[in-house]
Amino acid sequence: MTPDGIGVLAYQGGTVKFGASACQGFRPAPGLEVEVLAMAPHVLGGVRPSSIRMLTDDATYRQLMSSALSAFADEAPKVPDTVIEPPRALAVPTAKPLDLPELATPPPAGHRHVVVVRFTNKRDDLLFMRDVTLDGRLLRVRAFQAKAASPETPTNVFLNHATKWDTPEEARRQFDSEVATQTTSFEKRAHEVKTLPIAERALRLASDEALEKAFLETNEKSAAHVLADWLQTQGDLRGELAAVYERQGVPGAMEFLERNEALLGEASHALGGELHTLKWTHGFVTGASLKRGGYDSRTNLATLTADFLASPLARFVTDLRFGLASFESDNDWSETLRAITESPRGPFIQKLEFDDYTYEDCEISWTAFGDFSPYWSKLPRLEHLHIRSGEGGVLGDIELPSLKTFIRESGGLAGDELRAILNAKWPKLERLDLWFGRDGYGAEGTVELIQPILDAKVPAGLKHLGLINCEFSDQLLPALLESKILPKLKTLDLSRGVLMDADVELILKHADKFKHLEHLDLFENLLDQSGPKLEAAMPNIVFVGDQRYDGDEDRYCAVGE
């Protein structure tokens, strides 16, 4: 930052200049953490942030501001001490209720009014939009980007979350506040009042243990149809939902759910936003992804999980995927896992994935997963587990009698976790993927530490082994050639490691030890000229793909931060 208030924002994709006038209710200082609410064309070309909100806490702000004033004392005009106190009240404009004459007329019987306010900024052929929706007690905020030629088809969704307030009046106050805030950040604003039907009819739930068991154990279409037909005869909306899905597919089923939100109980407000990517099996929902809708979402991921799994719609759910529980480098999925194990579905869960986030949400190295150790005994049918976390957590004594796939994705896998994995009791394991990472980010793996794996002290059914993102894969390769595990494998993944051309010669020299494999993955290593030679020698086995070699002889694995 310069003394006159022109500065640079650093973000994961690079840097962008800004002016102090874009700062909402605070004076900029080096080191502040901020959120860019809107961008706008600049008179000198390009774009600049036009609205910036401060995220740094007050105490840190005062300290950074004092340092900035001291550093600029000789160049900047004297500033009264009072500017050190951040005028937070200015950051959120006073909420002036939006004039909505359409609401003066009550909706027809069986219907409700829904207000949608759309804010728009245009840059070249791109639109940056933010929809704020008020629907009774529900307030939904959705921010997205689209091409000007097709504004209703998002090319990138930045934010999508909903909050259900205690009363319609409180929801309206929050709605007015959100509208007032965004009005200062966007060039255009328009609103629409929609009249939509209320839920079609009251919820009735029916259960037949034999029919449900037949479907759960087979997942066959015939069993699903018998169950759906019976549910319809009992007036259970889940039967009709299954029939709608069979006739109209996902679009028809989602529309049915939106009209009959009672099927989702307390999780109804999250449908299509923080509860998404429903998995359908012959008209019944058997899986879903849950993730907070953005940095300013008020959703507690564990609470949302518990509400969803307690809903009638989740009666047959077995698969769950999760985004971050927190965006503030303090992620912890422990409470989410507890909500799963304490739910009616806990004993039936077969697939858990804690990996639905990108570096734009949070770097893998900043992401912890918490303490999972108390919950393994409550997941007797779990078959697939994927944990993506660089900061790590506690695995404890792993005992999963049904687990077939374990994927531990990391940029710095600690020794304690590796030892827990090596001592795990999972007799049915068929696939093991370990991402080791860089020692600069906490990776502690060595050939010696994973020697039990190389000695085939693993379940007899293990056919796939991934020793991935490994900083010592050049040392690992000779040990693999002499190992007891290699002859037992069908597939081997050594991708994202540090193998170079010299290491390929060792593979070619001992090609006979790899030819029993159905697949050998060497994607994103550091190969230069030897890739084609490998593929020619073992054309049905080796996958080389893209490599990361850039002429530098330093060895580094693909993922650390």
Image (spheres, helix red, strand yellow):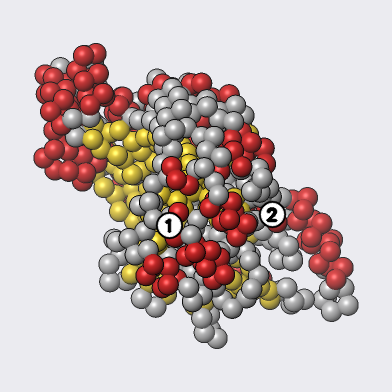
Mark yes or no: residue 530 visible.
yes
In what quadrant of the picture does the N terminus appear?
Answer: bottom right
Q: Is residue 325 visible?
A: no
**Apparent side of residue 196 relative to residue 518 in the rendered image (left or right):** left
Tell which circle, 2 or 1, labels the residue nearer the N-terminal end.
Answer: 2
Q: Is residue 121 left or right of residue 280?
A: right
Query: Looking at the image, is mark 2 or mark 1 nearer the viewer?
Result: 1
| Location of residue 537 (image quadrant) | bottom left
- What residue lies at 67% left-to-right and 37% top-to-bottom? 416
Residue at x-position 84% and y-position 73%: 72
Image coordinates for residue 76, horizontal then vertical, percent: 82, 76
Position in image of residue 466 (x %, y %): 49, 48
Along the line of sight, which residue is nearer the eye, 376 or 102?
376
Residue carrying label 2: 439
Vertical arrangement, residue 536 with respect to residue 429, above or below: below
Kind of residue at disc 2? Asp
Locate the C terminus and report the quarter of the image it occupies: bottom right
Query: Within the image, what quadrant is residue 271 found in?
Result: top left
Instruction: Name the residue: 52% across, 42% down.
Output: 484
Vertical position of residue 103 compared to residue 335: above or below? below
Taking the view exactly as shown, the residue that stands out farthest to the bottom is 44
Amino acid identity at mark 1 = Asp
Q: Read off the residue under disc 1.
A: 512
Numbered tag placed on residue 475 in the rendering? none
Q: Residue at horizontal 21%, vertical 14%?
A: 210
- Closest to the observer, 263 or 220: 220
